[in-house]
Amino acid sequence: MGTIHLSRADRLLVVLDQSLRALTGAPQASRPRPLAAATGPALDENERRHAGALMRVNHVGEVCAQALYVAQGVSTSDPMLARQFEKAANEETDHLAWTSDRLAELGAHKSLLNPLWYAGAFGIGLVAGRSGDATSLGFVVETERQVERHLEGHLTRLPAGDLPSRAIVEQMKADEARHAGAAEQAGAKRLPLPIRWAMRAAARVMTTTAYYV
């Protein structure tokens, strides 16, 4: 079967569909949700609220990941790289579904600013994609490495008894490390230090705000 080439209008429709599903739909995971090996103690109200806030931050991160990968996927002219971005986006959809489910279980709400987070991340993804494939891949590496460190921090901050959230975060962390490694192997260019600093500062604003809103 030959490669299907989408017109600009078709690609726009795909982007709109993916964006609407990320923001308003119920994401469908392609993999089973990671389960804890044991049942932890019941969380008290403060622990539940704190765990919910942390998982809301993680959910926002997955909303942003959807936007980034979709934007980078439509920006590249390399079909193989576009498929790599699509595969990563599909795995991030799993994360989106898992964190969404866990938020509901904890009685926590999704960030009210999700449309803003998505729009900002999509714009950044377009800029990265238009800067060339090597730079775009470098952006993936830096983003995923930052997310990996962020998730490691959440493993220390989540309540000790919140084993379900921990199982999700651990699998997410492993997936993000794999995405970064794949981008490096595909020819990622290391980003300049000022850009990496700016990315960290922006991520800090997002994670701090999403914890509450």
Image: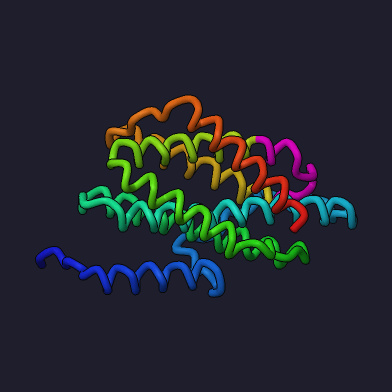
The answer to whether residue 162 is magenta is yes
Please state if 78 lies on the left or on the right of 159 as rendered: left
The magenta region covers 153-164
In this rendered view, identify the residue nearer to me: 105 or 59.
Answer: 59
Q: Residue at x 32, y 55 (%)?
A: 73
Q: Residue furthest left?
A: 2
Q: Specify the quadrant that holds the C terminus.
A: bottom right
Say if residue 23 shows up in the picture: yes
The image quadrant that residue 157 belongs to is top right
Q: Specify the quadrant that holds the N terminus.
A: bottom left
Q: Residue furthest top?
A: 193
Q: Residue at x 76, y 63 (%)?
A: 108
Please state the horizontal and vertical placement of residue 98, each as a whole percent of the image: 58, 60
The image quadrant that residue 201 belongs to is top right
Say if residue 164 shows up in the picture: no
Q: Is residue 134 above or below residue 51?
A: above
Q: Is residue 8 above or below residue 141?
A: below
Q: Is residue 84 above or below residue 12?
A: above
